[in-house]
Structures are given as structure tokens and as C-alpha cells.
Image: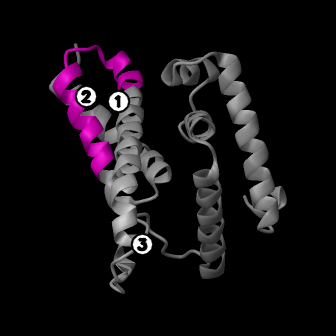
Amino acid sequence: MASRAELSQFLVDIEKRAYRHARLAVQHEDTALDLVQDAMLKLVDKYQDKPVEELPMLFHRILQNVITDHHRRQKVRNFWVLPFSLFTKEDDDDEVDLLSTVESESSYGQDPRKMLGNQQTINIIEAGLARLPARQREAFLLRYWEEHDVATTAALMGCSEGSVKTHCARANASLTQWLSEHGIKETDHD
């Protein structure tokens, strides 16, 4: 059974990766944060008595279920709301909060041109990830961003190791083509 401190530490450790994963899945920062919080609450509420070793797999499955539920709700909502929204005027209140785009890591002493290029590359990669089918994106994020091995990724996704390899290969091919279309080659980034 995980102690209160171990559970808290697990949630702290997984928070940023889970947020990035959810943000790529739903394409909205506030919604992604809400989904991650919902997943964390469900983990604590239903599985706090599980061993620490089981928490990563449980949390990932909960997060994927929360994201899937969100997409289902949006699909139903859009079915009913979209036709009515055609009769309303669009708001021009789409202000951008510049402070929310600032990275938390210190950039003191770094070359501004390189930082800008890196941020632009990251934005292009994230846009490419957002275009991937959900299972390919999930496999790619688990394997390469969260650095899980094939067996763990297969267990987290509830599929075979061969499926993970296929999803990753297809994601890599799509992302390589996407980056190439945007003028980024392997030698362009560190």
C-alpha cells in the first residue's frame, strides 16, 4: 500500500508529463489541466490502497479514460450545440495571456535566436503530434517522451508489444514527414 507521502510524490512527479499528454490530446490548456486533476482525484479516491509500483499504470489508464470520456462528451455536445452556434455572432475576445506562454525554466544567458528556434521547433512538433491518431500519439508519448520500454507501453495501452511497435513506427514516419514539410531535418535540431 502506498503511503500518503509516496502517493503525493508520485502525483508531483507525473503532473507535468500528464499535463503535456492531455494538452496534446485535447488541444486546450485549461481543459487539459482539468482532465489531469480529475485523473489524479480518481486515482487517490479509488486506488490509494494500491502498491506504489502499480500507480503509473493505473494513473495512465485513468488519464486515458478521462480523455476519452471528454472526447465523447464533446462529440455529443457539438452535435447539439454547433447547429445553434451558427446563428450567433462570434466574439472577438480571444486575448492571449503572454505570461502563460513563458516557460518555467530559466533562460538566463541563452542565445535568444537559438531559444526562438527551439521554441518554434517545439511548436511544430506539438502540432504534428496533435495531428496523429490517438493511439499513435499515445504510443509515441509513452515510448519517447515518458521513456517507457515496449512492454510497459503495451501494458499501459492495453495492447500487444507488436501493436506498440507499429503505432510508434507510423507515428515516427508521420512526424518525420511533418517536420520535413516544415523545413526541419534531423541535423537542424540538437
Query: What whole-number distance in Å separates the C-alpha atoms at marks 1 and 2?
Result: 7 Å
Q: Residue at x 47, y 45 (%)?
A: 21
Specify start and end residues of the magenta stretch as a single range: 34-58
Asked if residue 184 can be seen in this view, the reply is no
Q: Residue furthest bottom?
A: 92
Q: SS for tag 1?
A: helix
Any mark on residue 43, and which?
Answer: 2
Mark nearer the viewer, 3 or 1: 1
Q: SS for tag 2?
A: helix
Q: Quadrant of residue 65?
A: top left
Mark 1 closeness class: few <14, some 14–19, many ≥20 residues within 10 Å: many
- Is 24 within the magenta? no
Mark nearer the viewer, 1 or 2: 1
Give the mark nearest the N terminus, 3 or 1. Answer: 1
Query: What whole-number distance in Å separates the C-alpha atoms at marks 3 and 2?
Result: 30 Å
- Is 36 within the magenta? yes
Give the amino acid type for the residue marked by disc 2 in the picture: Leu
Q: Read off the residue under disc 3.
A: 102
In this orientation, which residue lies closer to the viewer: 155 or 51?
Answer: 155
Give the mark nearest the N terminus, 1 or 2. Answer: 2
Instruction: Tell whether 37 sits left or right of 177.
Output: left
Q: Residue at x 75, y 38 (%)?
A: 170
Any mark on residue 62, and which?
Answer: 1
